[in-house]
Amino acid sequence: MSKPAFHPIYHAHHAVALLFLSGIALSAQLLFSDIGNHGMMIIAAVLGGYMALNIGANDAGNNIGPLVGSAVIGLSGALLFAALFEAAGAFLAGDEVISTIKQGIVDPEQLGDSRTIIRVMFSAMLAGAVWLNIATATGTPVSTTHTIVGGVLGAGITVGGIGVADWEMIGAITVSWLISPLLSGIIAALLLYLIKRTITYQAKMSASAGKAVPLLVGLMAWTFTSYLLIKGVKASWRVDLPTALVCGMSIGLGVYLIIKPNIVQRTAMLPNTKSAVNRLFNLPLLLAAGLLSFAHGSNDVANAIGPLIAIKEAATVSGDPPLPDLPAWLLMIGAMGIPLGLVLYGKRLIKTIGSEITELDQVRAFCIVTSVTITVLLASRFGLPVSSTHTAVGAVFGIGFLRESLKTRYAIVLEMLRRRQAGQDRQVMEQFIKRFDRSSFHEKGRMLEQLNATDNRLELSNKERKSLNKLYRRELVKRSAFTRILLTWVITLPATGALAALIYHLLESTVIYNFLFNTGG
């Protein structure tokens, strides 16, 4: 029997989140109790934890949404699996990516005294967390990096004017917003079309998979190794892009040589069906999701604790003892908060990515996760920052729109064949269409060429083609989701900037200001 909506079980996740934030407040009280402004540090630490929860809820599910949507793993298992890798990435490799958020958006020297810097970072964190909370509640994936950048930018401009911002970096972020989803969508669509041409459009799919799948998994190993060397393990080893690509190629070649005999042996026993081919991608997709989650945790932990570290560094004023250096404690806030937010609140966004935009299977999920790494590598080549959310969602849309195009084209071809067979025996027509449907991609092309040579009824005018396109177009991408996500992406940076500016003015003009910045709590 289902429980009523007010049953306590429905609010247990809120209780866990409050317990986490209370734990942060208690530990901050113990760490900073002997230092002036300790009340400010307690609230800042709680805000950092709140931001981490929202990053996990909105952003961390991008890497496992395709796996859940393609039924590689169940939702509960995916949440725990990704949470483990997110935590490992944040704690083991997250300390190298903090500086951009601390000082790369605005120039701290132009903000004035330390208390002004503290108010700016307070405002940015709260604005970013609130915006992410709203986006998560509506099931809309947004870039957490753009969210916190907008907050820092809005509060910074409120203090120092437009000259305080690093507009070169803001311009690069804006360019990346335009390029990364388009690029990842195109790459994902090209990969899917390549797989269709080499495997699923072949008459002998299993045999074709034995040749193509090892190459595809080797490509995945190459791109993922290069991606991790650049984005995920900087704390362990710093490499440039060419070195990462060479190392990645070596790993990819090794993976190809190792798995090829096994894949060939397996495909020899597989039935000649698309679902059987899809299952070959299950294990590579699991490994890919884990590695992407590790890299995401290592990079996006900066969005949660970068402003917190900036507050801690600015909080030491003349005459006061310095605050203790606690990198492990600060990283722990992000390393625990991001995976916890994913587990508690990430289900809604996982469903959005996995099933609400377009239908996914293992092959499509493979194209999505691989396109993310290729997009990041290409962006790194040109020095463009990219959003993991934008690349992942852009890839999903690319897959969906390609499916629409292929389905529409195929429906038009069938209509042309029916026109060709008009007036002939219906059974003969249906047998021809069935034979056409079972044929490989190249065989279909030859059959159409032969028909074109004998009957000009297959030739369509532009008007007829447009009419058939409208008649047979199948919308496999939900337009409501597309419009909602695109609109939210457009307004994220200005919205968080305006919200941070409002919060800054409130902090400056109310009793909150006196509590935080005069009395020290």
Image (cartoon, rainbow, N blue to C red):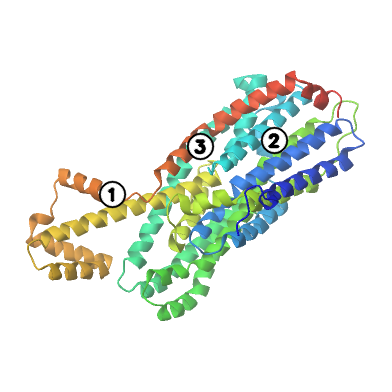
Q: Residue at x 69, y 24 (%)?
A: 504
Viewer-side residue, 401 vs 290: 401
Q: Position of residue 370 (x, y in %)?
A: 49, 57
Query: Where is mark 3, residue-wise?
Result: 489
| Residue 274 against residue 85 in the figure, above or below | below
Residue kind at label 2, given as amino acid type: Lys
Query: Where is mark 1, residue-wise?
Result: 473
Viewer-side residue, 444 vs 66: 66
Nearest to viewer (mark 3 / mark 2): 3
State yes or no: discs 1 and 2 in contact (Cβ < 8 Å): no
- Label 1 sits on a secondary structure element that is loop
| Image side of residue 177 versus residue 191, left or right | right
How far apart marks 3 and 2 lie (CA) works out to: 23 Å
How far apart marks 1 and 2 lie (CA) works out to: 49 Å
Nearest to viewer (mark 3 / mark 1): 1
User: Considering only order in the chain, which callout, 2 or 3, is on the residue closer to the N terminus?
Assistant: 2
Q: Residue at x 55, y 34 (%)?
A: 492
Residue 97 in view (yes/no)? no
Residue kind at label 3, given as amino acid type: Trp
| Image side of residue 23 versus residue 282, left or right | right
Residue 245 in view (yes/no)? yes
